[in-house]
Image (cartoon, coloured by chain):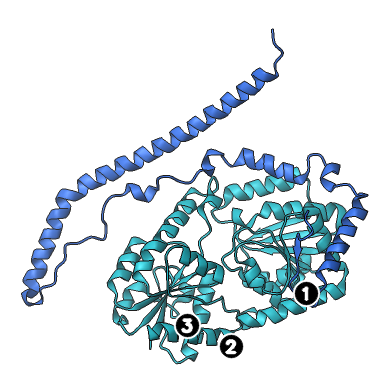
């Protein structure tokens, strides 16, 4: 713990006095020894070991590919142009073109998006499997080192 | 000048949604026509907000549209924003960095990543960006934004003029020491560090202590399971995690609290600090992100997570009434900076800057 571990900006409080009083209390309570040494394992160690077990180390890596990126369909896109003099005819032509383009394009895009999503799932499964195997190798290496030689 | 606001989802009890409603009051009191538009609207806000589709009737290049940004916008919102001619100001509430959610909530980690990337696209659409803290504005600057300002969260004391829940007061409003934290049970809040700190407090300093961890658990199942396991492993009693609570219950938790403790490592502002100030609860907080800025010259900031010392500091705060009084008095002074009267002036200045451009 450094001397400046506690910051008190409030000028009505003497920060140095508070820091000194806390230091005294810590020393008094522990007969000038650290608390962590009295508890084995210390609470901080318990946090670390639990965290390791619960949150997959591989998952700490940034998410490389997002589910949303798999979807390549421009869902909001419509062919649009504005020629006000054509009125209803213009609207009808636009509707027909949009419908036709979608009829050809959408099934292909849907299929590709589906493949992308499947690919991402497989990739994630493989990553998890890889990590599990890596951990197993580390365990086996540890056992090997601990076991007495022939 | 009409100054409207957009927030994707106005929700009850959410800090950004509360800010939207308070800003609407302030904007109207400044003489602006001001409506709120959202993509998803719970029934309790019917009449107070409009669905996004209605904006077609309001859009104008003379308008200023305040866009509240907390995580990310959908593609349809982005294309709507590109289409409308209104002057746009992003109000940046900050996005928790995605790495905090890794291994806990993958969709949220994805959304956080996407949201941060979207800041670059929004820069091209918006005329200005206002952080709810200078910390947030600096982050916009790092993303290449210019025309920046700071519009802090407005604290409306009227919202807290509510009778506290009797059941919570009955359960925890006794002579025992209550250490409070309010916020979503999320990894960036470092709830595990609060628990470690509490374990020293409970075992060595204040055996009568309770730890009240008040906040929603939604989407954080793995993290909450980790916290519950930690409490079990440390064999700790009196760690209370009630999940999402009503407004009346929240009032009661603040009234029962002897100390507000935060070990959070990422806060874009920290509304619970203002609430603790309002209820006269002394604050001990880890110095990270926007926390020092929100506290200003008040409260107690710890620069290192020296748990035994923090536990002793809490003990000292509870025993030394003079020290406690000085700290809470400083906090009350700080709270004035966030009251509607000051916010109104700040808002007027920021809007005149936008208008002058």
**Residue at the far front in the pictured view:** A3
Q: Which mark is nearer the camera, 3 or 2?
A: 3
- Location of residue B263 by image quarter: bottom right
Q: Calculate the distance from the C-alpha at mark 2 to the C-alpha at mark 1.
A: 24 Å
* Comes first in the chain, label 2 or label 1: 1
Q: Which mark is residue B269?
A: none
Is circle 1 on the same chain as circle 3?
yes
Answer whether residue B174 is visible to the viewer in this image.
no
Q: Where does label 3 land, which residue?
A: B350
Q: Residue at x 49, y 52 (%)?
A: B109
Q: Calculate the distance from the C-alpha at mark 1 to the C-alpha at mark 3.
A: 32 Å
Residue B274 appears left or right of A116: right
Q: Which mark is residue B341?
A: 2
Q: Nearer the viewer, residue B88 or A82?
A: B88
- Location of residue B168 by image quarter: bottom right
The chain painted cyan is: B
* Comes first in the chain, label 3 or label 2: 2
Q: Where does label 1 land, which residue?
A: B327
Q: Chain of mark 3?
A: B
| In the image, residue B261 above or below residue B322 | above
Q: Nearer the viewer, residue B243 or A23?
A: A23
Q: Residue at x 56, y 39 (%)?
A: A56
Secondary structure of residue under mark 2 = helix
The chain painted blue is: A
């Amino acid at each position: 713990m450094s001397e400046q571990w506690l910051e008190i900006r409030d000028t009505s409080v003497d920060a140095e006095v508070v820091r000194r009083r806390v230091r005294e209390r810590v020393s008094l309570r522990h007969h000038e020894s650290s608390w962590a040494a009295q508890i084995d394992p210390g609470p901080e160690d318990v946090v670390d070991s639990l965290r390791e077990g619960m949150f997959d180390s591989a998952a700490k890596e940034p998410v490389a590919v997002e589910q949303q990126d798999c979807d390549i369909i421009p869902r909001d896109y419509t062919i649009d142009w504005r020629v006000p003099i054509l009125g209803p005819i213009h609207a009808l032509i636009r509707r027909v073109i949009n419908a036709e383009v979608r009829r050809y394009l959408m099934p292909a895009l849907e299929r590709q998006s589906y493949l992308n999503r499947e690919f991402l799932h497989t990739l994630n499964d493989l990553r998890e499997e890889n990590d599990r195997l890596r951990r197993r190798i580390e365990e086996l290496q540890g056992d090997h080192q601990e076991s007495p030689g022939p | 000048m009409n100054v409207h606001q957009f927030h994707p989802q106005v929700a009850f009890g959410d800090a950004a949604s509360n800010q939207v409603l308070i800003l609407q009051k302030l904007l109207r009191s400044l003489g602006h026509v001001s409506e709120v538009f959202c993509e998803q609207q719970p029934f309790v806000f019917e009449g107070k907000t409009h669905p996004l589709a209605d904006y077609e009737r309001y859009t104008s290049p003379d308008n200023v549209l305040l866009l509240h940004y907390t995580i990310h916008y959908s593609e349809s919102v982005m294309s709507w924003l590109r289409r409308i001619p209104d002057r746009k100001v992003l109000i940046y509430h900050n996005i928790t960095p995605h790495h905090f959610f890794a291994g806990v909530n993958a969709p949220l980690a994805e959304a956080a990543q996407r949201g941060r990337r979207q800041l670059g696209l929004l820069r091209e659409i918006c005329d200005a960006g206002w952080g709810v803290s200078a910390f947030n504005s600096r982050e916009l600057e790092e993303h290449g934004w210019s025309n920046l300002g700071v519009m802090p969260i407005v604290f409306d004391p009227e919202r807290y003029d509510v009778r506290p829940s009797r059941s919570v007061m009955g359960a925890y409003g006794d002579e025992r020491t209550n250490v409070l934290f309010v916020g979503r049970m999320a990894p960036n809040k470092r709830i595990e560090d609060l628990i470690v700190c509490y374990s020293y407090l409970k075992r060595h300093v204040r055996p009568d202590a309770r730890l009240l961890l008040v906040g929603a658990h939604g989407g954080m199942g793995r993290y909450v399971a980790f916290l519950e396991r930690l409490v079990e492993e440390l064999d700790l009693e009196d760690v209370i995690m009630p999940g999402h609570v009503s407004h009346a219950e929240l009032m009661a938790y603040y009234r029962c609290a002897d100390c507000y403790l935060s070990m959070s490592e990422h806060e874009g502002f920290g509304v619970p600090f203002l609430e603790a100030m309002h209820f006269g609860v002394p604050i001990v907080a880890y110095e990270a992100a926007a926390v020092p800025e929100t506290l200003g010259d008040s409260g107690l900031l710890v620069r290192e997570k020296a748990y035994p010392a923090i536990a002793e500091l809490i003990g000292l705060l509870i025993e030394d009434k003079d020290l406690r009084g000085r700290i809470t008095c400083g906090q009350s002074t700080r709270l004035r900076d966030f009251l509607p009267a000051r916010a109104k002036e700040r808002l007027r200045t920021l809007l005149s800057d936008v208008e002058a451009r």
